[in-house]
Amino acid sequence: MIKDLEILVKMQAFDDEISERQMLLQTLPEELNTLKTSLEEANQVLAETKHSLEENLKNQKLKELEIKDNIEKMNKYKNQLLTVKTNKEYKALNSEISHLEGKNNEIDDEIIVFMEEEINIKSSLENVISVQKNADENLKANEERLRKKIKQVKQEIDVLRKNRNDIAGEIPRQIVKRYAALIKNKNRKAVVFDINNSCGGCGFNIRPQVVIEIYEGSKINYCENCGRILIYKPETD
């Protein structure tokens, strides 16, 4: 295989590794964002659950105050019964007392419902707190690791690019430019194998004469369809 072709193969190997690390640069931040989002959602649910509990207890307190106020009114009316002079006034006060007693019974039922809700909310709150704690600990445990990994991968990409560019200086500039265009426009695959007399990039059938030249490795051959550089794929056991 001629030197230019050997260098192109090495450049593609570097670009393959760069591609792998660039994929990592996409997945690692996504992983970090997922951890952050999980914590944000857990915090939101926790805040909402605490608010629900506060509203529940507040409503219970208001209902208790309402009962207390009604009891004070009933006591007042009962005292007035001792001083009324007509049967009409007596019936009116008794009617008001009965109404307030009925109202308090209804409020008692409402308080029971609130108390049942309180039990459910507190039970849910325990689970929500556990989820929030786990999300917080998970982020703390992995955030620094992920940030370091991202930094490391970026440094590795810089090294790989430098190594690729260093050897690229050993071949003619026009070949490098064509290689770079293929990397940019052909899904980062500029050098591909001849697979069963077909281009490993686009599957185009390679003419017999070109197949012979690819096996000889005496010149750079380009796919007549996609323009990628074609090389011989050695047989493996």
Image: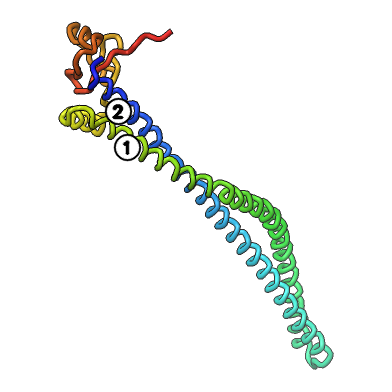
Q: Residue furthest left?
A: 174
Q: Name the image colouring.
A: rainbow
Q: Report the residue at 70% width, 69% height from top.
A: 60
Mark 1 lies on a secondary structure that is helix
What percent of the width, then of the height, locates residue 139? 56, 49
Res. 162 mark? 1
Q: Secondary structure at mark 2?
A: helix
**Residue at which label 2 appears:** 11
Tell me which numbered mark, 2 or 1, is placed earlier along the sequence.
Answer: 2
Image vertical order of residue 78 relative to residue 83, above or below:
above
Q: Can you say which quadrant of the picture contains the N terminus?
A: top left
**Residue 208: which quarter of the image?**
top left
Would you say residue 95 is visible in this rendering? no
Can you give x and y, in whole percent of width and height, for residue 180 in the image? 23, 32
Residue toward you, 117 or 106 = 117
- Tally of marks: 2
Answer left or right for 151 relative to 91. left
